[in-house]
Image: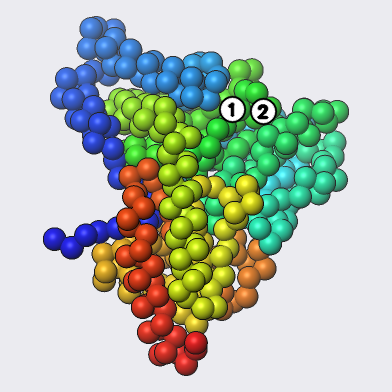
Amino acid sequence: MEREIYFDNSATTQVHPEVADLMHETMIRNYGNPSSLHKKGVQAEQAVSHVRKILAGALQVAPEEIYFTSGGTESNNTAIKGIVHAYKSRGNHIITSNVEHPSVLNVFDHLEELGFRVTYLRVNENGVIDLDELQDLLCNDTLLVSLMHVNNEVGSIQPIKEVGEILKGYHKKVYYHVDAVQSFGKLPVYPGKWGIDLLSISGHKFHGPKGIGALYIRKGTRVKALVEGGGQEKSLRSGTENVPGIVGLGKAAELAVQDREAHAQKMNAIRETLASRIREKVPNCRINSNFDGTGAPHILNISFPGTRSEVLLHYLEQDGIYVSSGSACSARKGKLSHVLTAMQLTEEEMEGSIRFSFSYFNEMDEVMPVVESVTKAVKELRELTGRK
């Protein structure tokens, strides 16, 4: 069988075998409803509570501040809509950036239709916001600041800790939400210490199952529920808990966090080597990810002018190499990347951009086959279009 190389880990990751085994065992043996009063229900509730403690330990917060959701999109929606509707009497101004994930940007489009005023921070050519601009935009009507920690397309790291310090020093309470879907398990993130009120994570981004995530909500913060029902998750998120998914989320978090620094070093070495080798082999390419300390270890975005990313990725697929043309949540829509647009790339650079993203399952010996395949594919495509 031809070797497959999976460099699309920002879209999703392979479930860790230990996670899959534990989930299977939970499905077979621990199948009770956590709301039931009998032994099976108590066992299920204990499993759920154990995972709350795991996530709380990883984030250095209290277990009662952890709420389970279906993933990053639900966590982001719950955090943003829940806060602005709970505290709308305090203001209607929201600050975010112009490079957020669609699960954040589309929520703000909806809120603007409802009369909220949303201001979008610009980013520089490295995809990073300007803290001075944030300070200038804060006003008495500002209710919420919502930012991603790591950008899912290019890997730029936003200064979320510094933002928290700015908001702590502001003369009125401004709630602070962070989308940590791409950073949890790869970078340290401590919402309790950093002044973050709400924080979103998603299991399938760090070798957990799809369809499960979590939302940190600082104690004392009111969030209006999106779903009414039986009152699970302290009435924030009604519906019978996905116990196998929650158990898988906890195990994946344990595995990701316990060796996080070693994993990050491994992924960053792969990222740096791939970038330097492609730069050597492929003329006229542009590296869109940062190597100055503001780039995440697991994401590398490169533009190959004279190619089209959707064609290039299928060329690579023929060699058993799997990459992405950008955010998997919006890649099928065929629009130019709003992230690369904000970073002021040319249309040709955007049309030929590829995202390589890594996990701790990847190995250094996968780099050169990818370099060779990319070099060959770009050369062929440029010859077809008359480019060099």
Q: Residue at x 31, y 30 (%)?
A: 248
Q: Return the residue at label 1.
A: 190
**Which of the two residues, 378 or 231, is positioned nearer the viewer here?**
378
Quarter holding residue 23? top left
Density class for disc 2 (Cα within 10 Å; few <14, some 14-19, many ≥20) is: some
Check disc 2 and report its element: helix, strand or loop: helix
From the viewer's perspective, tell me whether residue 103 is left or right of residue 293: left
Quarter holding residue 210? top left
Q: Position of residue 1 (x, y in %)?
A: 13, 61
Residue that protrudes farthest toward the bottom in the picture? 386
Check disc 1 and report its element: helix, strand or loop: loop
Q: Position of residue 151 (x, y in %)?
A: 56, 50
Quarter holding residue 344? bottom right
Q: Return the residue at label 2.
A: 194
Q: Is there CB contact under 8 Å for labels 1 and 2?
A: yes
**Which of the two residues, 110 or 99, is positioned nearer the viewer here?**
99
From the viewer's perspective, tell me whether residue 263 is left or right of residue 127: left
Q: Residue at x 58, y 63 (%)?
A: 288
Identify the colour scheme used: rainbow
Residue that protrudes farthest toward the top in the picture? 38
Q: Position of residue 195 (x, y in %)?
A: 68, 27
